Amino acid sequence: MAGTGVFSPGRAKIDARTLRRDRWWLEPALIFGLLFTFVVYSSVRAFWDTNYYNEDTSLLSPFYSPCLADACVEGSTHLGTPVGDWWALSPALLILILPLGFRMTCYYYRKAYYRSFWFSPPACAVAEPHKKYSGETRFPLIFQNAHRWFFWLTLPYPILLAYDAYDSVHHDGDWGVSLGSAILLFNALLLLAYSLSCHSCRHIMGGRLNHFSKHPIRYWGWVQVSKLNGKHMQLAMVSLVVVGLTDLYVLLTASGAFTDPRIG
C-alpha cells in the first residue's frame, strides 16, 4: 500500500538512493544478464523444434524430454506418445511449462528476478522505485503460492532425465559410454540436487513435527535436505546454466557440428 516502507512519513528523508559505497548493483546486473540470456535461448530452442535428438548416440535434449507427441523425432519417444497427434506445436512446450513454473515460483528465484528485473528492491539498503507494495497477495503474484505443487509435479523430472542418460548408454542394444551420456547424467543429478534443496522439500521433510525424536527417518531426511538447502542459491544457478549447456551440446551433435565421442 502507499506510504509504506522507505516512503512512510516516519522514515528519514535522504536524497541519495543509498548510502552504500560498494558495487551493490553488480549482483543484480549479473543475474539479469544470466536469466535474460537463458529465457531468450530456451524460448528459441522451444519453438525451434529441431536438432533435439541425436540418433547416433540416443541423446535427447532435456528441453524435449519426455517427448510425448506423435510429431516427436523417431526414437526420442522413450515413454510413448500419449499426447497423440492433436498437439500441433513444438513438443518442448508440453514439457517446459512445469520446470518453468517450479523455477518461477522458487523462493530464491523470486528474490533474484524481483531484484534484477523489478528492482523490488535492487539490493539491501537500496530504495526501490515503487511507491506501492502489496506483497504476493494479489494477482498475478498470488500464484507464487503454487510452488509446492510445482515441486511435486517436477520431482520425477530428474529421474526421467537420468533414464535418458541410461538410454544413451544402452544405444541400440549395445553398451557404451559417450561424453553426451555423461553430460545428461550430470545434468539430471544437478537438477535432482536443486529440487531436493528446495525450501518446500525441507518443510515437507521436517515440517509439522513437534518431536524429531519420534520421527527418526524424517529427521534424518530433514538433516540431509538442510545441508543441500544451504547451497540452494548455487544449485539454482548452476543447474540452470548446465541444463542450457546440455541442450546446446545435443543441438551441436544432432546438427552434425561434431561427433559425440563414444567408448564402446
Image: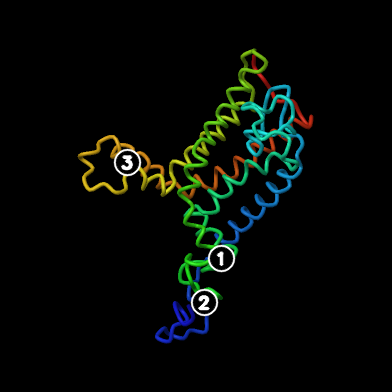
Find disc 2 in the rendering and name its residue.
Answer: 132
Tell me the crowding category of disc 2: few under 14, some 14 to 19, or many 20 or more residues within 10 angstroms, Cα based: few
Q: Which residue is drawn at 59% across and 40% down?
A: 242
Between 242 and 7, the residue placed more toward the observer is 7
Q: Judging from the image, what secondary structure is the residue with disc 3 in?
A: helix
Is mark 3 in CB contact (under 8 Å) with mark 1?
Answer: no
Q: Residue at x 47, y 47 (%)?
A: 149
The kind of residue tagged 2 is Lys
Counting residues from the start of the chain, the first of labels 1 and 2 encountered is 1
Find disc 1 in the rendering and name its residue.
Answer: 25
Counting residues from the start of the chain, the first of labels 3 and 1 encountered is 1
Tag in front: 3 or 1 = 3
Q: Distance between the residues labelled 1 and 2?
A: 22 Å
Tag in front: 1 or 2 = 2
Whole-percent x, y for residue 159 in the image: 52, 31
The kind of residue tagged 1 is Trp
The kind of residue tagged 3 is Val
Whole-percent x, y for residue 114 in the image: 54, 63
Find disc 3 in the rendering and name its residue.
Answer: 223
